[in-house]
Amino acid sequence: GPMTNVLLATADNIADSDLLISVDGSNNATFTTNNEIWILAGKTYFPGANVTAGSIEILSTAVFSPEANTVTLTNSGTPFTVTGTFTEGTSTITYTGGSATNVTGTTYYNLTLNHTGTTFTSAADSTVKGVFTITAGTFDASDDTLILAGSGTPLVNNGTFTASTSTVKYTGAVNTQIASATQDRKSTRLNSS
């Protein structure tokens, strides 16, 4: 079966000081600072609760499905690598790197960027099905396409959004609020389903 935080909690209870993970009573897993989780080829990780790790790498033919949980990535650089399958469910992926951080191009449900003074740069085209939140820091959309598919308010910007030469598409089916005109946007497209 798939790896879960409940299974990791079993390992956490063996009192091994070399173990680089702790799992709390709610089955939230926290990996030691700067450690990377590798989901190996052919393996599946369904955490069943929140995960905090430096980085996550989903290798070819591996599956990562955080379901409705929050995954916090604390490393800078490229803390999320998807060469296998990332099934976003209704999860929130939060990048909190303390220096320049690449935001992996994939489909997210909710995406949050949160570190004052950090520039988070789009590494490829992305889709956010729920809400894209810039809590702190700067998001540089580079030359990529960002699809905001959520209805209501799909972009919440409390930091800085730098469009560069990107395209931002709002594709929510109903009643979508467009981000303030003070955003540095080069191209915005509105699509109605």
Image (tube, grey):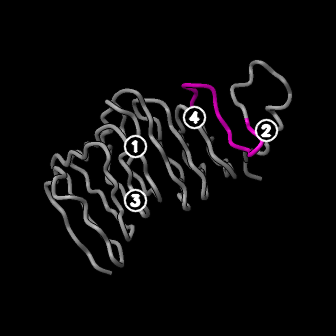
Q: Out of 104 and 60, give the one closest to the viewer.
A: 104
Left or right placement of residue 47 versus residue 187 in this view = right
- Image coords of residue 157 (percent x, y): 31, 50
Q: Out of 12 and 59, give the one closest to the viewer.
A: 12
Above or below for 98 versus 57: above
User: What residue do we see at 40% from left, 59% from top?
Assistant: 128
- Image coords of residue 186 (percent x, y): 13, 54
Q: How many angstroms separate mark 2 from mark 1 (CA)?
A: 28 Å
Q: How many angstroms separate mark 4 from mark 1 (CA)?
A: 15 Å
Q: How many angstroms separate mark 1 from mark 3 (CA)?
A: 13 Å
Q: Is residue 122 magenta?
A: no
Find numbered disc 4 in the image and state the secondary structure of the residue it sits on. Answer: strand
User: What residue do we see at 53% from left, 39% from top?
Assistant: 57
Q: Residues within 10 Å of mark 4 (few under 14, many from 20)?
A: many
Find numbered disc 3 in the image and state the secondary structure of the residue it sits on. Answer: strand
Q: Which residue is mark 4?
A: 53
Q: Which amino acid type corresponds to the residue marked 2 in the rendered image?
A: Ala
Looking at the rendered image, the quarter that the C terminus falls into is: bottom left
Question: In this rendering, which labeled residue sits more in front, label 2 or label 1?
Answer: 1
Above or below for 159 versus 182: above
Q: Which amino acid type corresponds to the residue marked 4 in the rendered image?
A: Ala
User: What residue do we see at 38% from left, 55% from top?
Assistant: 132
Q: Residues within 10 Å of mark 3 (few under 14, many from 20)?
A: many
Q: Earlier in the sequence, mark 4 or mark 3?
A: 4
Q: Which residue is mark 2?
A: 9
Q: Which residue is mark 1?
A: 113
Q: Main secondary structure of the magenta part?
A: loop
Q: How many angstroms separate mark 4 from mark 3 (CA)?
A: 21 Å
